[in-house]
Amino acid sequence: MCVTLIGGMDRLKPDYTAAAKAGGHTLKCISRNERNFVDKIGNPDRIIIFTNKISHEAKRKALQHARSHNIPIDMVHSCGVSSLRDCLAIP
C-alpha cells in the first residue's frame, strides 16, 4: 500500500520510512507546505496528517485533495514513529 505522510519532523524521516517498510508499505513524506504541494501528494492509497507539525493551509489543501479523490485520511496530533505504526496497524 502506498501512503503519503504530511507533517512530522524532518529528522525522523528515515525512521518513518523504515517503520512503513517493515509493515510492507511504501511511504512518501512531505514535511511542509511547498511549491506544487498538491502535485507532490499524488494519488496514494491513504494519507496520514500529523496535525501538530503542519500549517493550517497545508492541512486544508491535503484534506481537499483527499476528499476530491476519495482517499482515506488519518489525522493524528502527535508525530512520533509509534503514532505512524498505530495508523498503519504495524505491531
Image: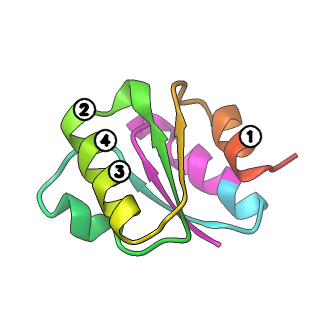
CA separation, marks 3 and 2?
Answer: 12 Å
Q: Earlier in the sequence, mark 1 or mark 3?
A: 3
Give the mark toward the camera: 3 or 2.
3
Q: Nearer the viewer, residue 57 or 80?
A: 57
User: Within 10 angstroms of label 1, few (less than 14), some, or many (20 or more) residues?
Assistant: few
Instruction: Say if 2 sits above or below 86 in the image.
Output: below
Q: Which residues are magenta?
A: 1-19
CA separation, marks 1 and 3?
Answer: 20 Å
- Is residue 13 visible in this depiction of the protein? yes
Q: What type is the residue that disc 1 sits on? A: Asp
User: Within 10 angstroms of label 2, few (less than 14), some, or many (20 or more) residues?
Assistant: few
**Residue identified by numbered label 1:** 86
Q: Earlier in the sequence, mark 1 or mark 2?
A: 2
Q: Nearer the viewer, residue 16 or 55?
A: 55
Tags 1 and 3 touching, CB below 8 Å: no
Tags 4 and 3 touching, CB below 8 Å: yes
Number of marks present in the image shown: 4
Residue 44 left/right relative to 40: right
Instruction: Say if 43 sits above or below 76 in the image.
Output: below
User: Within 10 angstroms of label 4, few (less than 14), some, or many (20 or more) residues?
Assistant: some
**Residue identified by numbered label 4:** 59
Q: Earlier in the sequence, mark 4 or mark 1?
A: 4
Q: Which mark is residue 55?
A: 2
Tags 2 and 4 touching, CB below 8 Å: yes
CA separation, marks 1 and 2?
Answer: 23 Å
